[in-house]
Amino acid sequence: MIWIYKAKTEDGLFTNEAIPIMRAAEATILEHEDYEKYCVLEYDLVDETTGETLPPQCEKPLSVMNIYYASEWNSTVAAEVISEFKTNPSSVDLYNRLAPCLDFSLFCDEILGTVSANATAWAEDMKVKIDSIIENWDGKGDLNPNVEQVTEFIAYMNLLFSKSFNVVFYLDSEFSVDNQKSMFSRSFFSWGQLLEGTDDEDESEEQLKE
């Protein structure tokens, strides 16, 4: 199911006023008492601290709320990433040039042979910083007090070939580094499939009751 949001003001949707409204709208689904009966479940989850297997959990929706309500946000690291790309626009091209190797381990021999060791080290450091931010986009925190920084970070991620898939779904075609206002956004909720190990709806219902 796709929800589409349209801004009511020229400031767009990514504001301190509009974001909580979208969050509240999505809560009518996510916090419904029967939501877990109908959501798509994720299996084989593991507690990163204890290593214990966790029970199945509802798959999180595709929503920009996951970003603005991230469980953790290192504003210092985010500022460093933004500053690197803002002060040296060619660094976006450099990261994109190295991205197939850095993010997907593809064509490393060919790519790394065309840049300096310093450039590679810079890109590797940027990848670590960027990933440390993105990995916490889970929608389990409070609203980030620095909405503007989050929006700017999103704008720069949208420029990176290997990172843009994390944000582009939520942005309209006019959103950019120079226009950090999205007049439209969308969220996607996954519904209904049989529980793992069951063959029909009746079996799934019985397993849910257990």
Image (tube, helix red, strand yellow):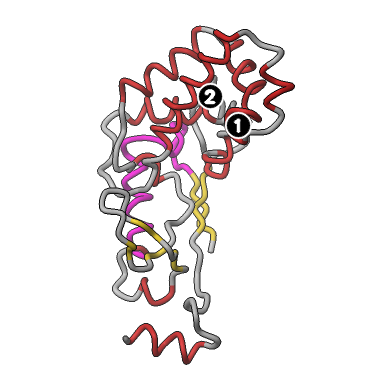
Residue toward you, 107 or 129? 107
Q: Earlier in the sequence, mark 2 or mark 1?
A: 1
Quarter of the image containing the C terminus? bottom left
Q: Quadrant of residue 119?
A: top right
Q: Quadrant of residue 129?
A: top left
- Residue at the outermost right position: 110
* Residue on which disc 1 sits: 174
Q: Are marks 2 and 1 in contact (CB under 8 Å)?
A: yes
User: Is 11 included in the stretch rendered in magenta?
Assistant: yes
Which residue is at 52% across, 39% downward?
167
Q: Which mark is residue 179?
A: 2
Mark 1: amino acid: Glu
Regarding mark 2 in the picture, which secondary structure is present there?
loop
Which residue is at 34% across, 31% downward?
147
Residue toward you, 116 or 203? 116
What whole-number distance in Å separates the C-alpha atoms at marks 2 and 1?
7 Å
Mark 2: amino acid: Asn
Looking at the rendering, the stretch of residues picked out in magenta corresponds to 7-29
Which residue is at 51% across, 45% downward?
185
Residue toward you, 172 or 105? 105
- 131 left or right of 171 in image: left
